[in-house]
Image (cartoon, rainbow, N blue to C red):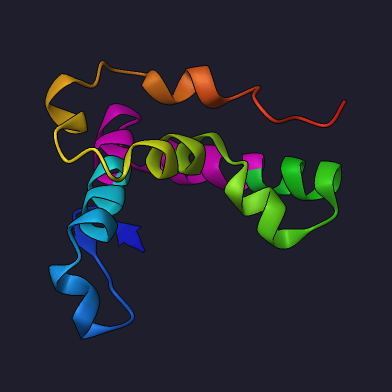
Amino acid sequence: MTLYPLIFLNNESLRGNSVVVNHERIHLRQQLELLIVPFYIIYGLEFVFRLIAYKNWKEAYHNISFEREAYKNEKDLDYLKRRQMWTFLKYLCLGLKL
């Protein structure tokens, strides 16, 4: 979990896992783009919206735009070097049940 500027790992062994750390660093970048507090507000609202749409906590979580971007790019350790601002927006409407 990432609470700017810290990354919290529930297991010390994850500290050396470059994929997990990269996933959380992507969230740090997203938080900076949105000036931190708005990130958490949008994240929470999007989660609630998706929970209503999917009626499944895990599916709702995995379809939050911030998570979609982070999961899709977590294995690309150079992703943050070339990532453009606001990239999470392209993941916003993907995967919606309409």
What secondary structure do most residues of the magenta stretch adopt? helix
The answer to whether 2 is drawn above or below residue 22 in the figure is below
| Residue at image point 84% right, 41% down | 53
The answer to whether 70 is drawn above or below residue 3 in the figure is above
What number of labels is visible? 0
| Residue at image point 28% right, 59% down | 20
In percent of width and height, residue 91 lies at: 53, 25
Which stretch is magenta? 28-46
Q: Residue furthest front?
A: 75
* Left or right: residue 11 compared with residue 57: left
In percent of width and height, residue 61 lies at: 61, 52
**Nearer to me, 50 or 13:** 13
* Left or right: residue 96 compared with residue 24: right
Q: Quadrant of residue 38?
A: top left
| Residue at image point 58% right, 25% down | 92
In percent of width and height, residue 21 lies at: 22, 57
* Left or right: residue 41 compared with residue 35: right
| Residue at image point 64% right, 25% down | 94
Q: Is residue 41 magenta?
A: yes
Q: Quadrant of residue 5?
A: bottom left
**Nearer to me, 43 or 83:** 83
Q: Is residue 52 magenta?
A: no
In what quadrant of the picture does the C terminus appear? top right
In what quadrant of the picture does the N terminus appear? bottom left
In percent of width and height, residue 55 lies at: 85, 54
